[in-house]
Every structure is written in structure tokens, then in C-alpha cells.
Image (cartoon, rainbow, N blue to C red):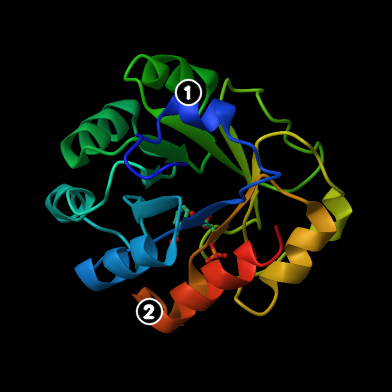
Amino acid sequence: MAIGHPLDRAAVNDWNPLTSLFVKVCGLRTERDVDTAVEAGADAIGFVFAESPRQVDADTARRLVRRVPEHVLTVAVFRNQSLGEVRALSSAAGVGAVQLHGSEGRDYYDILRQDDVVLIRGAAFREPIPQYGDMGEDMLLLDAPTPGAGVPWNWAQFGSSTDKWLLAGGLTPDNVGEAIAATKPFGVDVSSGVEVSRGVKDPALITSFIKAARAQV
Ligand SMILES: O=C(O)c1ccccc1N[C@@H]1O[C@H](COP(=O)(O)O)[C@@H](O)[C@H]1O
């Protein structure tokens, strides 16, 4: 994505993963970590509104979102919250994308689509294997059963797919290269693997993760 162009739904649809892997860093809570992720070349930055040690309130998210250039997608992450809460918080924060990580139904996606945000569906990898597009999402994120726990799943089981899917769950600067080589995802997402303790990011790990992921493409 050329600097200065907004990363909106059209840009996501036109994205060519063969030339650029989509890299998301999630659970950011401080200016330092947001600036580090942007400078290191993240394509998306996530703010967690779900119950989590990484949870932020709308004011904090809004302040952080304002620092992010428009070529980087800002993502609000929810899990089993009401549609009213999802819409109110994502609109107050001013994000460009919503990630639903629970058992939200198709009605959430249909209504949020009208808010003109990029829609990311977070789903655990299990049988039946979640299929890209089943909820009308723009990207499918395949994760471990407990999101944000830093526990890897058996990525190789998934094989690979040309769909717009993000690999997540227990990724680190040390294993992301191997995980990309095994699954050839559209993109990757990380939270715990760039932290020194739960909820506390390490700028050096953020930078190493993005560098290691980009080295594969
Ligand atoms: O990070 C959280 O606490 C969280 C809470 C609720 C829903 C999603 C959450 N995070 C997402 O979890 C994955 C993987 O995280 P990890 O790298 O294994 O720690 C990531 O996609 C986050 O978006």
C-alpha cells in the first residue's frame, strides 16, 4: 500500500499477498507501541474492547487511532458483545475495521457493513473448518481456541488457501517465518508473542516480528 492512501475495504479487496503480506499487531495500549508498530511497517493495528488484560476504553483508543496514518488500518476487537456496544465503541474510537472474535451471527456483519468498516471474522480452527466469506467478512482470522492466549495451534493442519485469511495464535518473531512457509496466509496477526508480560508490549519484539514476517515474502 502506497503511503498516503487509505487502507479501506477497496484496498483490502485489491491487496496482492504475493507482493505484500498483511501484518497486524494487536492489543496496543500506548503511544510508544502504536508508533513502533507504524514505524516498523504494520498494515493494521488492533485495539481490544473485549474483556482482556489488553482492554482499552473508547477515549484511549480514539487518542491512539488519531496517531495512525491512514495507510494503516485501525481495528477494534470485540468478543460476544452486543451489536449496540460494538457500533458505539467502534464509532467513538474512529476505527476503520471491526474484528468479531466470538459467536456473533450474520446479522452483526450485515449491519456493520452499512457502517463502511472492514470486517474481520476471528474464528477458532476446528471442525467444521471455518470458511472465508461465510459471514460476508472481508478477512477471516484463524486462531487458537482461546484468543489472545499466545498458544499456537497446528497450523500445518490447515494447509494453505488463496482466500483472504490471517494466521493468528501463538505467533512470535521466532516461529512466524516457519508458520508462513507452512500455510502461505494472506496475513498474520500477533499479540502475546510481542509482549514481555500479559498486556505489556515490547517495542523490540514488535519490530522483530514484523521484520521476520516480511522476510518470508
Ligand atoms: O488479545 C486478546 O486479549 C483478545 C481478546 C479477545 C478477542 C481477541 C483477542 N486477541 C486476538 O487474539 C489473537 C491471537 O493472539 P495471540 O498472538 O495468540 O496472543 C490475535 O488475533 C488478537 O487479535
Is 14 placed left or right of 205 in the picture? right
Is 87 placed left or right of 109 in the picture? left
Q: Nearer the viewer, residue 65 or 153?
A: 65
Q: Which residue is mark 2?
A: 203
Residue 31, percent across and down? Answer: 21, 67
Disc 1 vs disc 2: Cβ atoms closer than 8 Å?
Answer: no
- Nearer the N terminus, badge 1 or badge 2? 1
Residue 26, percent across and down? Answer: 43, 59
Is 204 placed left or right of 6 in the picture? right
Residue at 47% over, 41% down: 1
Residue 187, percent across and down? Answer: 62, 49
Residue 154 visible from this viewpoint: no
Res 172 quadrant in image: bottom right
Question: What kind of element bears circle 2?
Answer: helix
Residue 92, percent across and down? Answer: 16, 37
Question: What kind of element bears circle 1?
Answer: helix
**Disc 1 residue lies near ligand 1 with CB under 8 A:** no
**Above or below, 151 relative to 137:** below
